Image (cartoon, rainbow, N blue to C red):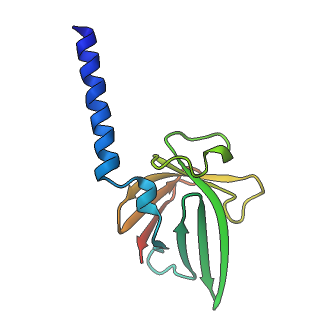
Amino acid sequence: MKKRLLYLIVLIQIGAAGSVSVYGQSMLDKLTGKTWEFEHPAGKQEYEIKDRYSNSNRTSAIYARGKELSEYQPFYLSDTVDARFDDSKVGKNRNGKYLIIKGEPGNEVGSFAVFEILKLNSTEFVIKSLRSNSVFRHRAV
């Protein structure tokens, strides 16, 4: 009886996982292919930030005082908070609870940032920094 129940549970999980991959988009699919504009808190817009994600890199374009600065940073999605940036995970995971980005701007070499993904759909992308506990909202443009 226990074997039958275990077998049934495994079959249900396999079926559910298969239907998600066939009918639903992965988090990486939702993240890539669009430009995400950072939404500044009211009255705080001194510059404009637009991010684009590929399978393995984030490109941040920062516009301030008529100039543009672009930065490229490797990233990966993870279900765990890693103690260090793991280059072997870049481009491997299509889903995850956390966005892990190498070399956050303005930080020392070898640094990385971990963000919890609070919301991700076709129009909104909301993340929370685990370092500062700040929430960052983005909208697709």
Residue 85 in view (yes/no) = no
Q: Residue extending furthest left?
A: 1
Indicate the position of residue 74 as horizontal and vertical percent values: 64, 58
Residue 90 in view (yes/no) = yes
Q: Name the foreground residue: 64 vs 141.
A: 141
Indicate the position of residue 8 as horizontal and vertical percent values: 24, 22
Q: How many marks?
A: 0
* Quadrant showing the N terminus: top left
* Quadrant showing the C terminus: bottom left
Q: Residue extending furthest right?
A: 109
Q: Is residue 11 left or right of residue 31?
A: left
Taking the spot 46% from the left edge, 69% from the top edge, the residue there is: 33
Q: Is residue 84 left or right of residue 31?
A: right
Q: Is residue 140 left or right of residue 75?
A: left
Indicate the position of residue 24 as horizontal and vertical percent values: 31, 53
Taking the spot 43% from the left edge, 59% from the top edge, the residue there is: 29
Indicate the position of residue 48 as horizontal and vertical percent values: 55, 80
Taking the spot 39% from the left edge, 59% from the top edge, the residue there is: 120
Q: Name the foreground residue: 79 vs 9.
A: 9
